[in-house]
Image (tube, rainbow, N blue to C red):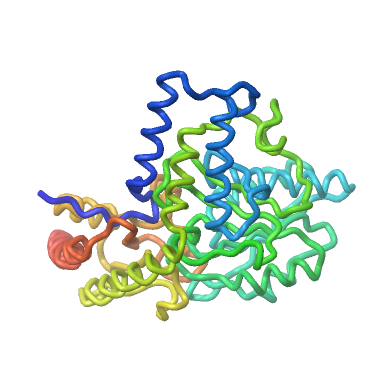
Amino acid sequence: MARHYLDHASTSPLRPEAVEAMVSWLTAAGRGEVGDPGRIHAEGMRARVALEEAREQVAALLGARSREVVFTSGATEAIAAATWGAVRRAVDAGRRPHVVLAAVEHSAVRQSSTAFAEAFGGSVSITGVDRCGRIDPDELLDAVTTDTALVHLQWGNHEVGTLQPVADVVAGCRERGVLVHVDAAQAAGRVPVDLGALGADLASASGHKLGGPAGTGVLFVRRGLRVAPLLLGGDQERARRAGVEDVAALVGLGAAAGALADGGVAGEEARCRSLTARLVEGLTAVDGVELLGDPDPAGRLPHLVCLGVAGVEPQGVLLGLDQRGVAAHSGSACASEGLEPSPVLEAMGVDAHRSLRVSVGWSTTEADVEAAVAALPDVVGHLRSLAG
């Protein structure tokens, strides 16, 4: 049976360019031709050159300076590092740290904010969203106080794809003199991202979401901003993140970012929008299946759609699709693994227990999409017949 992978929002397959770059690097490493990028011998310098070339490729994708890019093990670490750095900055200034975020933020944002702020006697303010999952910039900014250490805002939502008014929030934070972190894990490589023009202080991105290797990520730190590092023990990444860099993986991340250069993001965005438009058309034709999030495609990320499926449990839908060769997902990864209702959908005021997330990417074909459109009616019909 042919397989049809429609879970790119969870992780995207390695791009061929990334595979080629990593194999080449690992082959050289196996021959002893490369070493620790922090050393001044020839082998170390080869590694340093490769690492900095990868940094420049990633910086170009994100609209950043290469010196503003800190490599991490993933977006989760980058989010934690951004939060920790901002909280410690407030504590060192004699304030009880206060963090502001929306109810639809990823669990990595929610949990790191609560843990770090409360560790120093601080607090977290969580603001609501509308039925599309979009924040009100005024409401988010009104939660800022004189103790606010950081405001979080995702570029686009990881469950329903809703794009947020990041430019308005960043501008408001700059006016108030408060740091702002943008979670770009789902946006980077999917839509044009220019962190320099945006004016964000901190941002995070994930390697495996855009076709790079798992275990790679990016923390963007605006030029001139000083924040304490989360990981201590060495001066790697210009003393912003201790630990010897995984050069082989980061070379792969750089190659994946490089594959999106010269208009590649715009091209993939257009192709993904076409594929998800067909998914929305075909899947919502099933009785009891409705689109969740912004009904206007321009208000959503191009690569994912979230659907409410009435009358059936999401696990049954996912297993049924999988048996028919279609890989999809339901809700956020953290929520579904715990079999708990989605906090994103709860915040939107819709059914938080029954959702289907289908997402496309660089390797998705029209055949993959048509397989999902053909399979869902049979799966849902069968489950409903069993229920009664």
Question: At 21% from the left edge and 66% from the top edge, which residue is drawn?
Answer: 366
Near-viewer residue (16 or 240): 16
Residue 340 in sight: no
Question: At 57% from the left edge and 61% from the top edge, which residue is drawn?
Answer: 154
Left or right: where 16 falls relative to 92: left
Q: Position of residue 270 (x, y in %)?
A: 37, 72
Q: How many marks?
A: 0
Name the quarter where the C terminus is drawn.
bottom left
Tell me the quarter of the picture where residue 241 sits. Answer: top right
Q: Position of residue 384 (x, y in %)?
A: 17, 64
Q: Residue furthest left?
A: 1
Left or right: where 133 falls relative to 117: left
Near-viewer residue (196 or 20): 20
| Vertical comparison of 215 with 266: above or below | above
Tell me the quarter of the picture where residue 267 sits. Answer: bottom left
Q: Position of residue 381 (x, y in %)?
A: 14, 66
Question: At 42% from the left edge and 26% from the top edge, which residue is drawn?
Answer: 28
| Vertical comparison of 212 with 278: above or below | above
Tell me the quarter of the picture where residue 136 sits. Answer: bottom right
Residue 181 in sight: yes
Q: Residue furthest bottom?
A: 296
